[in-house]
Amino acid sequence: TPLSHIRNFSIVAHIDHGKSTLADRLIQSTNTVADRDMKEQMLDSMDIERERGITIKAQTVRINYVADDGEEYVLNLIDTPGHVDFAYEVSRSMRAVEGSLLVVDSTQGVEAQTLANVYHALDADHEIVPVLNKIDLPAADCDRVAEQIEDVIGIDASDAIRVSAKTGIGIKETLEAIVTRLPAPTGTLDAPLKAMLVDSWYDSYLGVIVLVRIMDGQLKKGDRIRFMQNGTVHHVDRIGVFRPAMTEIATLGPGELGFLTASIKQVRDTRVGDTITHEKRGTDKALPGFKPAQPVVFCGLFPVDSAEFEDLRDAIEKLALNDASFSFEMETSAALGFGFRCGFLGLLHLEVIRDRIEREYDIDLITTAPSVIYDIHMKDGTVQQLHNPADMPDLTYVDHIQEPRIKATILVPDEFLGDVLKLCQDRRGIQENLTYAGSRAMVVYDLPLNEVVFDFYDRLKSVTKGYASFDYQMTGYRQDALVKMSILVNDEPVDALSTMVHRDRAETRGRAMVEKLKDLIPRHMFKIPIQAAIGGKVIARETLSAMRKDVTAKCYGGDASRKRKLLDKQKAGKKKMRQFGKVDIPQEAFISALKMD
Ligand code: GTP
């Protein structure tokens, strides 16, 4: 296809504003797939994604479209992940296309993720076509939302397309706008091959599938190619495009998007943003700006049943093959036994991996408190990176501690603003900006990442009844008065409950934790002290009193089946417990104890 007849684009939107529905509709209206093959939401492939309604891995589809000018165009849509954890992948994949459809729900307006994603698109110099979706709904207010797009994002929305992805209104106009308003790609056919690695994933039949955008040159089946990051050379088995089913073709040229397979065993070997060239007569200039996505949140994953450790290792190794940004190493905890210290791009990433281990591999897990990476500046001038509060070095050798900070952008209806400011303030936030767009406020806060990783997002949703949207980016490290707080149950430290906290918050946090644990730990035959301590100093203490009677006593001994049920329930509960010295702690205590409210 000549460059003038190619258009490459992505769709940027906040969650639920209709990205997948619109993509489906574009595919369907161009007969890219027969109607009977059209599954709802073609582009979201994994189960978890579908259940949670989020798109994690980028997918792509090639659409042939005969425009009003009578010419046939090739439209390549890449679907980018919509969540803040995957910001790096979003920003890279945006560089593979020239334009974006900016989809905004006309009953809702601009949200924090709309902003974050549109900034990535603007960074990549995209032409942007605003699309107001859901105009079939009575609450649609296109004029207001168009004005908001202009005010908040600062792009012209006077010719925004009014669409209902659900009923099909405006779909034809959208396709025409892609052809007439987005630029064609550029590139040189007879230059050395330069292709960008946009995404990759594992397929059990074909091995790793690599999605590429050809910048210059031509890629053919049988070529020997080199990944410039690690220098590995591969033989190309197949190339093709997605329609959206995989279809093999003979060559991929400049401006085109497609896939290759090359007997690559693990996704880890294929880094998003890498440059691919030919082994011989290749380019020596890689595409600029490559950096691998780095994990920022760490936690321990331990099997509830220690006999499942090897199964857990197996599950983690398999998942890691397919996810270059997930890191792990073995860890031993005095309390929890053998497990793994794992690194994630963010909380959602953590949750997705944990869910998959529990569901696909059927292993019950104990997850320890998520932690960020602290820089520990030692008195001898060296700096240690602390991934696990349990490894905190002796304070006499520590000069000071730095923690990562983020810039958080929150959009919220007026009436909840007070609660949001209070929440951010409680989490040691520093307000940087507060502006209004209609009846909605946009606040920007500088916050410590460690105050956000645990339950900030849940709290934000709950104080705003779900109306706030949130996005963040890492800004850098800053020194603060941080201390390690330990929890002792029956005088034994439970290393898995150690956390780093700010000195000023330690007492409140410690008190909340011991109170929670008191409710979560079942009574035993003896008294159990539960304490929070900094160094050797106890800052909060509760005592769980001893059990006095048989639990079944309250059933008045009458009903035997009820009694049995109760004992069975106790037994089932036991399975999910871990022993600490003489004390059984239920699994949910680890998570709940760390939630703050
Ligand atoms: P994520 O995949 O979670 O990022 O969401 P999304 O942006 O892809 O949104 P999706 O397409 O899943 O749409 C969200 C909801 O809005 C679904 O229930 C759709 O059926 C509905 N929806 C999408 N477009 C329209 C529309 O034009 N009109 C109406 N009434 N509903 C729509």
Image (cartoon, helix red, strand yellow):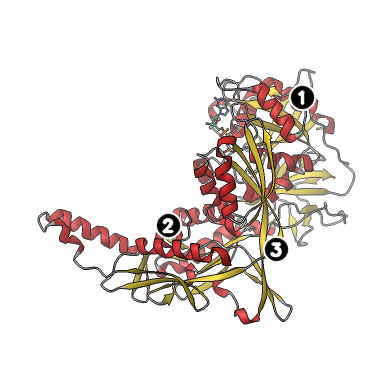
Numbered tag placed on residue 478 in the rendering: 3
Which one is in front in this view, the residue at disc 1 or the one at disc 3? Answer: 3
Q: Secondary structure at mark 3?
A: strand
Label 2 Cα crowd, 10 Å radius (few <14 / some 14-19 / many 20+): some
Please name whichever residue, 482 or 168, is drawn nearer the observer in this view of the structure: 482
Residue 42 visible to an observer of this rendering: no
Residue 320 visible to an observer of this rendering: yes
State the residue at coordinates (76%, 54%): 274
Ligand 1 resides in the quarter of the picture at top right
Distance from disc 2 to disc 3, alpha carbons, whole Å, reads 41 Å
The amino acid sitting under disc 1 is Glu
Asked if the residues shown at circle 1 and circle 2 are in contact, with their CB atoms under 8 angstroms apart, the answer is no
- Check disc 1 and report the residue beneath it: 72
Q: Secondary structure at mark 2?
A: loop
Q: Position of residue 578 (x, y in %)?
A: 38, 68
Task: Answer left or right for 284 relative to 122.
Answer: right
Q: Earlier in the sequence, mark 1 or mark 2?
A: 1
Q: From what the image shows, is residue 243 above or below residue 197? A: above
Mark 2 Cβ and ligand 1 under 8 Å apart: no
Please name whichever residue, 433 or 579, is drawn nearer the observer in this view of the structure: 433
Please name whichever residue, 502 or 43, is drawn nearer the observer in this view of the structure: 502
Label 3 Cα crowd, 10 Å radius (few <14 / some 14-19 / many 20+): few
Numbered tag placed on residue 362 in the rendering: 2
Numbered tag placed on residue 372 in the rendering: none
The amino acid sitting under disc 3 is Arg
Label 1 Cα crowd, 10 Å radius (few <14 / some 14-19 / many 20+): some
State the residue at coordinates (87%, 49%): 192
Q: Position of residue 157 (x, y in %)?
A: 74, 26
